[in-house]
Image: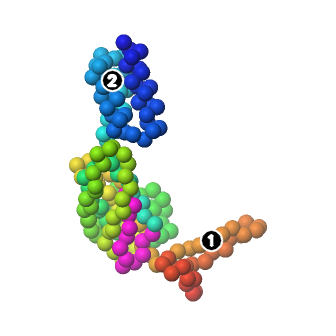
Amino acid sequence: LDVCAEVYLRLSERMQHKDDPAQRLVLLREGIKRYPNYNRINALKNEEKEILSPRLDFRMEYAYPEEPIHLWVQHRNLQGFTVKLYQLFLSAESDALVKVGPKTVTKYGKLVGEEHFDLPPTPDYRLRMDTVKMKPLKTGIYYAVAVPDGHRNTIRGALIYVSSLQVLHRALPDNRQEMVVLDKQSGHPVAAA
C-alpha cells in the first residue's frame, strides 16, 4: 500500500509544473484520505499545507514625491493586507540601510501612516498579480511593512526611496563610469546635480 500512496506524492510533484494547484489539492486530499497510515503521510500533508498557505510579495517601480505609489502585489489565499509606513531618519549612504529589520526601524524610524488594501479572492490557489495605489509621500527614506490580514507570521518589508532624482550610470573603458542625474518622471538631466 505504501507504493500506492507514493504514487500520489509523485503525481503531485509532476502536477506542480502544470500550475494547477486546485487539481493538485484534490489529488493530495484523496491520497491523504485513502492512505492515512502511510509512513510518509506528512509529505502529502506538507504539500497540501503549502498550497493552502497565504502568500504576499510586493514591489514598486519607483516613488516620486507627492505622487501616488503603485505597488505590484503578488498574492494568494489572502483577503487583504495593511501597509505600515515608517520614515527612516538616515542618510542614503548609511550602513544601517544595508540590512533593514525591526531593530533598524525601532532605532531610526517613526510610523507615519497605515493603509489597508482589499485583495480579490484566489479560489484556484494560484498566485495572482494586482496593483494597488498608496498615498503620496514626501521626499525621504521609508520602510514599508506589509501585514497580511489574519497572518502576522508572513510579514514582508521593503525600503522605499522617495525622490525626484535617479542616477543613470554606464561603464566606460579603463574601469571608468559615467553618471548622470535625471528627473525620474521626465527623464531629463538635472543641472548641477
Mark 1 and mark 2 in contact (Cβ < 8 Å)?
no
Report the residue that reaches farthest toward the left: 150
Please state the horizontal and vertical placement of residue 159, each as a whole percent of the image.
41, 63
Within 10 Å of disc 1 (Cα), the crowding (few <14, some 14-19, many 20+) is few
Please state the horizontal and vertical placement of residue 88, each as a whole percent of the image.
37, 68
In this rendering, position of residue 50 left or right of residue 183: left
Quarter of the picture holding the N terminus? top left
N-term-proximal mark, 2 vs 1 = 2
Q: SS class of the residue under badge 1?
A: strand
- Which dot, 2 or 1, sits closer to the camera? 2
In this rendering, position of residue 37 left or right of residue 74: left
Q: Nearer the viewer, residue 84 or 135?
A: 135
Bounds of the magenta segment: 62-73
Asked if the stretch drawn in magenta spans residue 69, the answer is: yes
Please state the horizontal and vertical placement of residue 10, each as a whole percent of the image.
44, 26
In this rendering, position of residue 181 left or right of residue 185: right
- Tell me the CA gap for discs 2 and 1: 55 Å
Report whether residue 124 is seen: yes
Q: Which residue sits at x=77%, y=67%?
A: 174
Report the residue that reaches farthest toward the top: 1
Asked if the stretch drawn in magenta spans residue 173, the answer is: no
Q: Which residue in the structure is indicated by mark 2?
A: 31
Q: Which residue sits at x=39%, y=40%?
A: 20
Q: Which residue sits at x=34%, y=29%?
A: 27
Q: Amino acid at mark 2?
A: Gly
Q: Nearer the viewer, residue 133 or 171?
A: 133
- The label number, if any, that marks residue 169 in the structure image: 1
Quadrant location of residue 162? bottom left
Q: Which residue sits at x=33%, y=23%?
A: 31
Q: Amino acid at mark 1?
A: His
Q: Nearer the viewer, residue 66 or 5?
A: 5
Quarter of the picture holding the C terminus? bottom right
